[in-house]
Amino acid sequence: MLLDPQNPRLKPLWVRILIVAVPLVLAAAGFDQGSVTVGVVFGLLGGFAFSRLFLP
């Protein structure tokens, strides 16, 4: 399944943090530049990654 938290490559905490942080930084940059659509899309991707990797 997409972003399986049991995958050994996603075991280190820094990898999971990076996977969540990159889309959220891109969302912030999109909102800062005035592109709401890009900000929303990347914000949703970051939220989805957070929910899959950090929430039970």
Image: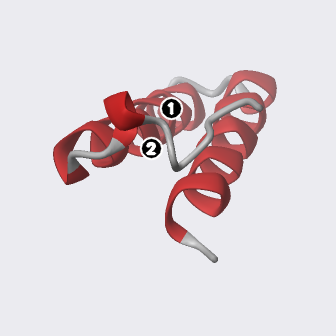
Tell which tag, 2 or 1, sits nearer the viewer.
Answer: 2
Amino acid type of the residue that numbered disc 2 sits on in the rendered structure: Val
Amino acid type of the residue that numbered disc 1 sits on in the rendered structure: Pro
Q: CA distance from mark 2 to mark 1?
A: 6 Å
Q: Reply above or below: 33 against 23.
A: above
Q: Are marks 2 and 1 in contact (CB under 8 Å)?
A: yes
Q: Is residue 3 left or right of residue 16?
A: right
Q: How is the image coloured?
A: secondary structure
Label of residue 23 in the image: 1
The residue tagged with tag 1: helix, strand or loop? Answer: helix
Q: Position of residue 2 (x, y in %)?
A: 72, 30
Label of residue 56 in the image: none
Along the line of sight, the residue nearer the viewer: 19 or 1: 1
Q: Residue at x 18, y 45 (%)?
A: 14
- Classify the position of the N terminus by image quarter: top right
Q: Reply above or below: 14 against 29.
A: below
Q: Residues within 10 Å of mark 1 (few under 14, many from 20)?
A: many
Label of residue 20 in the image: 2
The residue tagged with tag 2: helix, strand or loop? Answer: helix
Total tally of numbered discs in the picture: 2
Along the line of sight, the residue nearer the viewer: 31 or 47: 47
Q: Position of residue 23 (x, y in %)?
A: 50, 32
Q: Residues within 10 Å of mark 2 (few under 14, many from 20)?
A: many
